[in-house]
Image (cartoon, grey):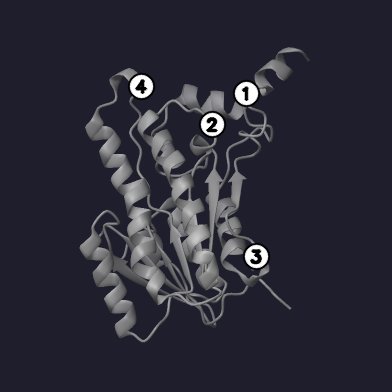
Amino acid sequence: MPSLRLDGRTVVVTGAAQGQGAAEARMLTEAGARVIATDLAASIPAELESVIPSPDGVLVYRQLDVSDATGWAELAAWIRSQGWQVDGLVNNAGITRRSRLLDTSVADLQKVYEVNVAGSLLGIQSLAPLMGSGASIVNVGSVAGLTAHYPVAYTASKWALRGLSQVAAMELGPRGIRVNTVHPGFIETPMTQGAKPEFRQATVAETPLGRTGSVGEVAGVVLFLLSPLSSFVTGAEIPVDGGQASHGGAKSVSDALR
């Protein structure tokens, strides 16, 4: 019977040094996967040092700048040298710039795009040749990719990632490789800690569940999409946002009429 176990599978997770990526790496290891956790740091980050191998899972750390094509090629070559195939890829790495529309520079747009979109493209291009039928790619989008949102560079990048994901699902499907996207809302991470209190309050007010989310709640959906339980799911977009994107801004109207 299909399960959430990932025993014997190798999964690459980008942006795994902290927050959401670290939670994903931890949960996937606990599910029995060999997790290759990557990030910018030269040595294993503190948040990953505490990951305890499960009976079948283990975590390996590799330095990687997702915007660097050479780095991806070196990672792929190293994985191949170990005699491993890649069964899963989580394109989790992402950055933001919080400037508004009329203040955003082209440089801001390009920098965010290089990580959030080009980084995911490079990951798919580099690791798909190491994947067989049954492999799964999960791209981490955002509620900002489902609606209009105030940080324009970040929002534009996540909308672009949706297009990349759909094309990848279409082109890799005949090879048995699935590609899906999760769209987190306001999740408690080091990235969102820098948000203004007014942004936090307004976001919670627009979230039907009335709270922020946890990194574990996102990691659980990622695990499902990597597991055999989702074997006929591809091209899907799953919000993990407490319902924030579901009402199209109508919640404030509904609340005002109570």
Say which quarter of the image contains residue 244.
Answer: top right
Q: Which residue is mark 4?
A: 101
CB under 8 Å between discs 1 and 2: yes
Residue type beneath disc 1: Gly
Residue type beneath disc 2: Thr
Q: Which mark is residue 147?
A: 2
CB under 8 Å between discs 4 and 2: no
Please determine whether, in this image, residue 128 is positioned above or below residue 118: below
Label 1 crowding class (10 Å Cα cut-off): few <14, some 14-19, many 20+? few
Where does the image place residue 90, in percent across and percent down from the top left?
Answer: 45, 60
Where does the image place residue 36, in percent across and percent down from the top left?
Answer: 39, 70
* CA distance separating discs 4 and 3: 38 Å
Please determine whether, in this image, residue 221 is positioned above or below residue 141: below
The mark nearer the N terminus, 4 or 1, is 4
Where does the image place residue 38, in percent across and percent down from the top left?
Answer: 34, 63
Q: Which residue is mark 3?
A: 230
Mark 2: which secondary structure? loop
Q: Residue at x 44, y 46 (%)?
A: 161
Q: Residue at x 29, y 46 (%)?
A: 114
The mark nearer the N terminus, 1 or 3, is 3
Mark 1: which secondary structure? loop
Where does the image place residue 220, in percent across and percent down from the top left?
Answer: 60, 58
* CA distance separating discs 3 and 2: 26 Å
**Quadrant that contains the N terminus:** bottom right
Q: Which residue is mark 1?
A: 249
The mark nearer the N terminus, 4 or 3, is 4
Say which quarter of the image contains residue 51.
Answer: bottom left
